[in-house]
Amino acid sequence: MRILTLLVVALLAVVLVACSGDDGNQAPFEVSGPPRAVDEDGTGDDSATAASSAREAPTVAYRGARATPPLPKPDVVLTDTNGDSFDFLAQTEGYLTLLYLGYTHCPDICPTHLLELSKVLEAMDPELVERIRVVFITTDPERDDAAAIRRWLDLFDSSFIGLTIEPDTLSSLLTFLGMPQITKRDIGDGRYTVNHATFLIAYTPDNLGHIVYPFLQGGGLREIMEHDLPLLAENGWQEPS
Amino acid sequence: MTSPLRAWWRLAAAALAVLAVGTFVACDDEDDGDAGGSIEISNARARFTTTDVGAVYFDIRSTGPGDRLVSASAEIAADTQVHEIVSEGGSSMMRPVEGGIPIDPGGHVSLQPGGYHVMVLGVSEIPEPGATFEVVLEFERAGRMTITVHVQEFGDDDGDMDHEEGMDHE
């Protein structure tokens, strides 16, 4: 039995490396909820088991990474891409607020992350999407002015809110969010890339970020968000049982 | 409910099925790269957003000995770098690949969104979707190869995230 188990686990590991993103059945980082739920997902036929367990007892399990303790929502006033002030706490009140920090000259990670998010929202029930606000804050205040951010966000979704920020404010915000300070890597000719934390924070209407969605190499992020975001938008935060 | 043993067998069967599909896909590549000895390149594409920085992705297959993609260059760009993504905790970071991207003998590596990519930066004009440009790849063994890269409509790479093959270390 144990040998069989190991064999299956090893086999799955190979499959996930070789065909990651195939079925959305990875549990690539620590997830909240009972491990059993993750195993069930791994079988690839979770619909039946999920339905039957839902009948037995209403259980909640999220596939995103659990932030413990939950992250408090920042009380900060920034400027949106129309040049209007944006009171983060007040203007996201009551919404499932998805916060991402990145920069428009980012060649791969940021566009991939936000593209996955926009695809999830596109396919979601519009009534639930109305309960969601996506907010982007630049980690590159030097190059990302309002126009640059707007142009870039419109590639994904024109409803995404873009905020400019002063470098000092960015620094304190990162500290508050528990994210490392940004570092720049000089790549010559005055050009640079920006290293920044790469996770999306999901603040539920209780004004706390219980779940985050880190960037995943090799895909799977979309399936994870597809699973969680409708739950969080519809019910707010529910302690996993 | 099925017994635990039965469940594991089903899991094993599912895993084998997926493995079989993965192998099939990997063998179904249409090679449209030019001959570089034992290296074949396919599915070469580029993604640009609204800045002068873009990413180039493609699949590399070795039909012979192992090799390394050590560098890339493109005339349309001021600079070109072969990048990898390194993840730690909740953060991921891209950085130049030290020593190049290894390709195992007979192996297959995909450069794809969220993983290995060639960053092109400082393009004088953002190429339009549908346009093509050339990228010169330098392999340790196979030497220099020129590939033609197709600029994608933004968002079109969508499908590639879903059936990517990742790195094949075998």
Image: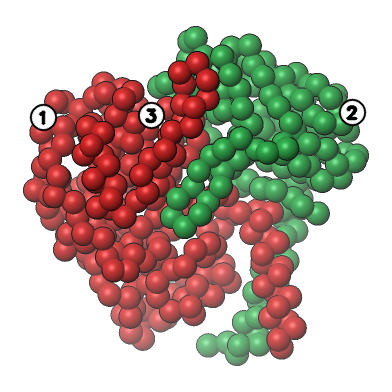
Residue at image x 23%, y 37%? A168
Q: Amino acid at mark 3?
A: Thr
Locate residue B151, reporting x and y percent: 56, 21
| Image quadrant containing the N terminus of chain A | bottom right
Image vertical order of residue A141 relative to residue B103, above or below: above
Q: Amino acid at mark 1?
A: Asp
How far is disc 1 from disc 3 in space, using C-alphas? Answer: 20 Å
Q: Which residue is mark 3?
A: A104
Residue A84's disc number:
1
Q: Residues within 10 Å of mark 2 (few under 14, many from 20)?
A: some
Q: Chain of mark 2?
A: B
Give the chain coloured red: A
Give the chain coloured green: B
Residue at image x 61%, y 35%? B96
Q: Secondary structure at mark 3?
A: loop
Tag 2 and tag 3, C-beta contact below 8 Å: no
How far is disc 2 from disc 3 in space, using C-alphas? Answer: 38 Å
Q: Chain of mark 1?
A: A
